[in-house]
Image: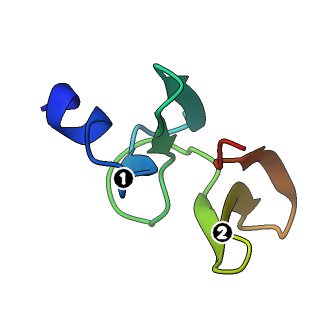
Amino acid sequence: MMKVLENRSSVKAVFVGHNHGLDWCCPYKDKLWLCFARHTGYGGYGNWPRGSRILEITEMPFRIKSWIRMEDGSVHSAVNLTYD
């Protein structure tokens, strides 16, 4: 699966989640980004802080930015997902 994704020039990032309190993005072979999102809802177990990964995509010039907005409004983990 990873070979297919890295060979598709239209694929810039892959997003999955949730894993409770974890959220991160990391580059994969300088071709695409792998991002994991945190717990967002009220179901399930644990008392994890709730937040959501936000994507901002611009067309001209093409850019993808992402960050985590927490339930209390704070922001963290901003990252530029576009290779220049």
Report the front residue among 47 and 83: 83
Q: Are marks 2 and 1 in contact (CB under 8 Å)?
A: no
Q: Quick one: which residue is furthest to the right in this view? A: 74
Q: Residue at x 27, y 47 (%)?
A: 8
* Residue picked out by circle 2: 62
Please give the name of the residue rendered at 47% of the width and 51% of the height, measured from the top-left corner: 39
Q: CA distance from mark 2 to mark 1?
A: 13 Å
Left or right of 58? Residue 29 is left
| Front in this rendered view, residue 29 or 39 | 29
Quarter occupied by residue 63:
bottom right
Residue 48, picture quadrant: top right
The quadrant holding residue 21 is: top right
Image location (x, y in percent) of residue 53: 59, 59
Crowd around label 1: few <14 · some 14–19 · many ≥20 (10 Å): few
The amino acid type, in three-letter code, at marker 1 is Val
Residue at 51% across, 47% down: 38
The amino acid beneath tag 2 is Phe
Please indicate whether residue 82 sits to the left or right of residue 31 in the image. Answer: right
Tell me residue 40's x, y (percent).
Answer: 49, 61
Mark 2 vs mark 1: which is more N-terminal? 1
Image position of 42 (left or right of 4): right
Q: Which residue is tagged 1?
A: 11
